[in-house]
Image: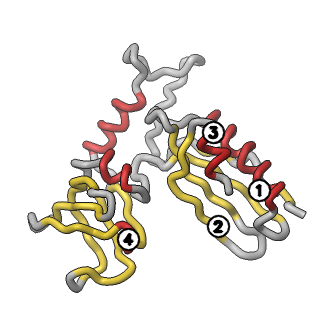
Amino acid sequence: MISPAVEAMGYEIVRVAVLGRERPTVQIMADRADGALISVEDCERISHAVGAVLDVEDPIPGAWTLEVSSAGIDRPLTRAKDWERFAGHQARAEMLVPLDGRRRFAGVVLGCDGTAARMRLDDGSEVALPLAEIRRARLVLTDALIEASAHMAQPAGGNDLAADGRNDMDTDGEGPQASGASGRKVH
């Protein structure tokens, strides 16, 4: 329902979660389709567009809150392309059903063949995790991941200062966030 609007704006949805019952919070994690780091302004644009779609489609009864954010540095790995993009970095994964007698795996991301994510485990063995059976997976915050993220954030000129002189480098791992549709009533 919201993917077409978000994709038409040049973004990709990483994850959508609805949390809470009394006044649910719709959490959306997004990436820029061009691979650049997402900004607070990007999150605001997505929030306005998604808020409008949710107002019209009315999928959630009563009041709700919308939160839009980047996936952050230690992001979830939800799509095959995430497993390819972050090959070489540490990750943890949990399966819906045991695979070879275990549900949890930790190691280095090796990539994805389209149906299974591949990891080299801490003991040196390799495993193929069927994407459809992964309950959750996310990158592990390491110095190498922080350094790789810093290189992605650096503009072509090598200066990571925003136009107002602030350093916009995300150091908390959460990334930019916007809550532009907080408290909307869909009825």
**Label 4 vs 3, first from the N-terminus:** 3
Quadrant, the C terminus: bottom right
Q: Secondary structure at mark 3?
A: helix
Residue 49 lies, in percent from the top left, at: 73, 44
The colour mode here is secondary structure
- Mark 4–mark 3 distance (CA, rounded to whole Å): 28 Å
Disc nearest the viewer among 4 and 2 = 4
Q: What amino acid is at disc 4?
A: Ile
As drawn, the label of residue 164 is none
Disc 1 from disc 2: Cα separation: 13 Å
Q: Which residue is mark 2?
A: 18
Name the amino acid, label 1. Leu
Residue assigned mark 4: 134
| Residue 48 horizontal/vertical position (percent) | 74, 43
Task: Compare marks 1 and 2 and give the one earlier in the sequence.
Answer: 2
Please tell me in which quadrant of the rendered image residue 8 appears. Answer: top right
Three-letter amino acid code of the residue under disc 3: Ala
Image check: 125 left or right of 81? left
Residue 109 percent across, percent down from the top left: 24, 55
What's the distance in space between the residues labelled 4 and 2, CA to CA?
A: 19 Å
Nearer-N-terminus badge (1/3): 3
Residue 8 shows which numbered tag?
3
64 relative to 163, above or below:
below
Q: Earlier in the sequence, mark 4 or mark 2?
A: 2
